[in-house]
Image (cartoon, grey):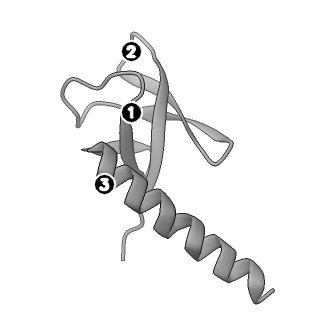
Amino acid sequence: MCLAIPYTITKINDNCTAKAVSNNVSVEVRLDLLEHAEIGNTILVHAGFAIQKLEKNEADELYALWNEAVESEEKYK
């Protein structure tokens, strides 16, 4: 099973990389697999590569599900 995490692009570098953030975690991701990535896009990241851009409603739904999973996990610690 693969896990892709939603991130929002905050900066695009010249070398096909970008800085992206999710829940206060900042990472550098490769943009080789995406066309027309822009600052503010929400993307799915797997193994350091942006693999898909998300529409606003998709991103909102995915963030809500992600936060629900995190809260559920914390409840059982």
Distance from disc 3 to disc 2, alpha carbons, whole Å, reads 28 Å
Residue 20 in view: yes
Residue at numbered disc 3: 58
Residue type at the position of mark 1: Arg
Residue ID at (42%, 66%): 3
Q: Give, as a three-letter code, the residue at label 2.
A: Asn
| Residue topped by disc 2 | 15
The N terminus, quarter of image: bottom left
Q: Earlier in the sequence, mark 2 or mark 1?
A: 2
Q: Residues within 10 Å of mark 2 (few under 14, many from 20)?
A: few
Q: Amino acid at mark 3?
A: Glu
Q: Where is the C terminus found, in terms of image quarters?
A: bottom right
Tell me if residue 57 comes above or below residue 49 in the rendering: below
User: Of label 3 and label 1, which has the lower sequence position?
Assistant: 1
Disc nearest the viewer among 3 and 2: 3
The residue closer to the viewer here, 10 or 50, is 10
Closer to the camera in the image, 13 or 65: 65
Image quarter for residue 71? Answer: bottom right
On screen, residue 42 versus residue 25, left or right, reads left
**Mark identifier at residue 30:** 1
Residue at horizontal 48 percent and vertical 44 percent from the top:
7
Q: Residues within 10 Å of mark 1 (few under 14, many from 20)?
A: many
> How far across and how far down the image is residue 18, in percent?
45, 25
Image coords of residue 20 (percent x, y): 52, 33
